[in-house]
Amino acid sequence: MVEKTLAIIKPDAVKKKAVGKIVQRIEEEGFSISGMKQLHLTKEEAEGFYIVHKEKSFYGSLTDFMSSGDIIVLVLEREDAIAHWRKTMGVTDPALAEPGTLRHSFGFSVERNACHGSDAPETAAWEIDYFYKKP
């Protein structure tokens, strides 16, 4: 079934100039890109996006990081997009990510791990709407 997922190329990967390599990998993995824009989140926008983590100890540092530089926000489509994107990214900790995954290749730490992806269809719909709301 063709589905949509949200992907974010995080500030660390943008600063490393890895955007082109990550987008190339997205295309090689068979995704269609139906939305793509560069943003610089405010602290408040980052807090709104990561509101689900508000009570967690890393919330402040995560939202500081996500508002520290430009990001690339993409809407990806393909069959089983959510699962396939998560496999392509690799596990959250780049040190534990499988070689060849994006986080292994471009990540630095659990927080600065190059990319984000939705974890479920409901999350994907909410996250896509967060960045691509109709006015």
Image (cartoon, rainbow, N blue to C red):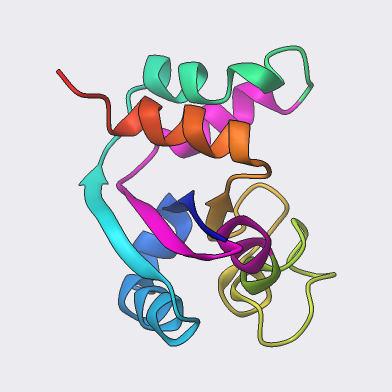
Residue at the (60%, 33%) spot, across then down = 123
- Name above or below for residue 49 compared with residue 120: above
User: Residue 77, relative to residue 129: is it above or below?
Assistant: below
Point out the image quarter for the C terminus: top left
Residue 45: quadrant of the picture? top left
Magenta stretch encompasses residue 108: no
Q: Nearer the viewer, residue 52 or 33?
A: 33
Q: Where is residue 59 in the image (x, y as percent from the top left)?
A: 66, 23
- Side of 50 relative to 93 (left or right): left
Outermost residue, right side: 96
Residue 82 lies, with reference to residue 60, above or below; the image says below
Residue 72 in magenta stretch:
yes
Judge by depth and name the residue closer to the eye, 65 or 32: 32
In the displayed structure image, the side of residue 93 where residue 124 appears, left or right: left
Q: Which image quarter holds the N terminus?
A: bottom right
Q: Which of 95 and 90 is in front in this view?
A: 90
Q: How many marks?
A: 0
Q: Where is residue 16 in the image (x, y as percent from the top left)?
A: 40, 70
Outermost residue toward the front?
A: 1
Which contiguous range is marked in magenta?
58-86
The residue sitting at the left extreme is 135
Residue at 59% across, 74% down: 102
Which residue does the image show at 42% across and 61% down from the upper left?
77
Q: In this view, does 23 lie to the left or right of 105?
A: left
Residue at (63%, 73%) from the top-left corner? 88
Location of residue 61 in the rendering, given as x and y in whole percent from the top left corner:
62, 30
Q: Where is residue 103 in the image (x, y as percent from the top left)?
A: 64, 69
